[in-house]
Amino acid sequence: MATFLYQLGRFAFRRRRFVALIWIALLAVAGVGAATAAAPAADSLAIPGTEAQRAFDLLDQRFPGTNADGATARVVFKAPAGETMKDPANKAAVERTVHALRSGSPQVDRVADPYTARALSKDGRTAYAQVSYKVTGFELTDASKDALEDAAKDGRDAGLTVETGGNALQAIPETGATEVIGIAISAVVLVITFGALIAAGLPLVTALIGVGIGVSTITALSSTLDLSTTTSTLATMIGLAVGIDYALFIVSRYRAEITEGSEREEAAGRAVGTAGSAVVFAGLTVVIALVGLAVVNIPMLTKMGLAAAGTVVIAVLIALTLIPALLGFAGKRVLPRKARKARKDREGREDRESAAAGEPQGRPATAAERPNMGTRWARFVLRRPVTVLLAAVVALGAVAVPAASLELGLPDDGSQPTDTTQRKAYDLLTDGFGAGFNGPLMLVVDGRVVHAGQSTKTAAARVAKEVGALDDVAVLTPPTFNKAGDTAMLTVVPKSKPSSAATEDLVHDIRSRSTGIAHDTGAKTLVTGTTAMNVDVSQKLDDALLPYLALVVGLAFLLLMVVFRSVLVPLKAALGFLLSVVAALGAVVAVFQWGWLGDVFGVEQTGPIMSMMPIFLVGVVFGLAMDYEVFLVTRMREAFVHGERPGEAVVTGFRHGARVVTAAAVIMISVFAGFIGSTDAMIKMIGFGLAVAVLFDAFLVRMAVVPAVLALLGRSAWWLPGWLQKILPNVDVEGEGLRERLAADAGGPDASAARAPERV
């Protein structure tokens, strides 16, 4: 592996114009594809294997033309104080609005008049018109959305309060200025880390190119593959973070090789051969975690994972090829001015003294006399491993405590910002009719196969009687039958809000009663609707969490065992990850469910944590956590393989890697934190969760727990049974094979031995 990547790095350096041209061409092609692509055909929300999805499919078959999965909107009216919606002037304004809704777009299927549908509150001040469309929310044209908004304006002009809810107005989430701030912070960190603008700019430029290619490709394929808008946002989030980090490690290793005396092309080859190996395996862990989301069998989540994984693959390829090519263009300007001057002076001095001395060139001897912060921290941990380990574990455990109170659900309009029309409509309906009107349930009674003496009507009547007697039911509409008379549809309005535990319990109660009804009558009753779909999604995600965790952690464990040729190091990496992810979940619960520091992070409405958050956090954070494990511990393994004692290897790993890993973590945190400013509740929560997870994993687990555990384990940390030694392939991540080949090519002892890591 290292030898192949070494050759690839040198090739990219030599053929830099060709390599750069290839990537620019790919960016141009992807950009043209995105610019000419049709709008997404739909935002696929099908959840195979769930009762709610089976009910939707049955409605499409038995009630043709109802568009069960079509977009919906609720236009909510409220009369001024002292008036009611029955006043002639207000009624006339509503009728005009209903007429405008019906005639405003050919995509409108039907509009329910509030007065004929009896959609007036008890006090008469609130009413709503239900708008159903022939197409899904992402198939609505801008003209249809404009017509909906214009109709609402007509009602406002008459003096009414008019707000619109529903999924017809769903739009691409906005992230605001905080995303730009996150990138700006990344730029500052890079400048501080490298001390040279050229070196700092390379990771940013290449990450933006990679994200540009990835997101443009997603946009170009979104119509064909029915990709959701969240897919490109997630790809941007992860692509920026890993793209900057991977380039950072390659550039950092290149600068180290240049400083140690290598020629530029040789330095590029060595950087890609060593740090590039770590990039490949770190990228593989992220890809495994993202692709593994397919086991949940939720198409939207699978597509999100595959798209983000594709962006990670692009980031890895760019780090291995475009970075060495751009390093060729940059020349020695990747070094700070002082370093360039010192290197020039040293080269001149060595030229004058070369032949007589006959000694291998290497680093200035004073380097070891000026230990950096990473060296000092590693030595501190080696002196007090138990104290550091206990402190880190206790801190993470304390933050993880709120995770015990985790409540799962899916966001609805009640989680929207308070200044949006969707949230205002949600609140108006809650005040006028009750919270349950924002998430009605739909019951489908399939009476095609009933027992002798039974009928669809008797089965539907039985369902209405038993469901209507449940405590949390506010309203139950009479059954509506299809033309064949073999299927009935009923609407249930809960008393509680859609995302509450009480509504979830109601869904389970109805389903448990339907089992008895089916036994007695033969008719099957299915519960569906957005709220029921959310309940099913949550259950599906809960059921998939453990198998997913076993699959991802198991595959990554095997991969890390190949990388480190050790059993205990991968085991420690996996256990450390569990600490960080549980602590991150605790922080998410504290902020988004309990409301702690809610004002700081823009959380306007607390509630259940998004159902996919645990499994998503497990997948993404595991991949990203293994990045730092690979980058940091690979350098330790490299030092150990080349003869250092276990403690010395830990110090060497921190001396070379701590500064860069710290910079990479700060960059990744700032990128993820930039998405906390999103108007979309899901994106906001994901951004916060990933940011705190990286914070905990990089600074507490990898910087504290890892060296403490390695110090306690000593040589046994690198133990591998003999039979595994024979089975596992040797991928040469440390570059040992590369060093031997370079020494053989030079016709003498390994030239790098003279500049092997110094004993401490």
Image: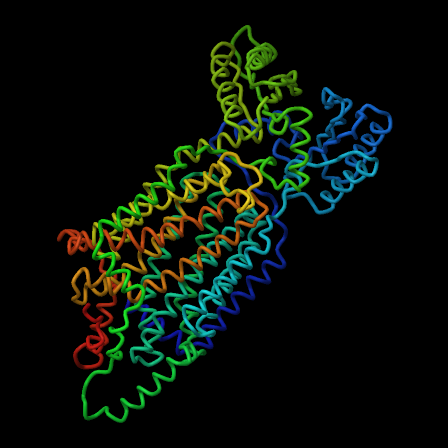
In which quadrant is the C terminus drawn? Answer: bottom left
Asked if residue 268 lies left or right of residue 222, the reply is: left
Looking at the picture, the colour scheme in use is rainbow
Q: Nearer the viewer, residue 654 or 421?
A: 654
| Residue 152 versus residue 500 in the image, above or below | below
Q: Nearer the viewer, residue 70 or 367?
A: 367
Asked if residue 737 lies left or right of residue 346, the reply is: left
Residue 155 drawn at (x, y percent)? 80, 36
**Number of labelled discs?**
0
| Residue 45 versus residue 278 in the image, above or below | above
Q: Nearer the viewer, residue 416 or 234?
A: 416
In which quadrant is the N terminus drawn? Answer: bottom left
**Residue at image location 39% in from the left, 81% down from the top:** 338
Residue 216 drawn at (x, y percent)? 55, 58
Q: Nearer the viewer, residue 266 or 106?
A: 266
Residue 469 picture quarter: top right
Residue 546 drawn at (x, y percent)? 35, 37
Residue 679 drawn at (x, y percent)? 59, 46
**Residue at image location 74% in from the left, 42% down from the top:** 149
| Residue 441 versus residue 409 in the image, above or below | above
**Residue at image location 44% in from the left, 38% down from the top:** 297
Furthest toward the top, the residue is 453
Furthest toward the left, the residue is 722
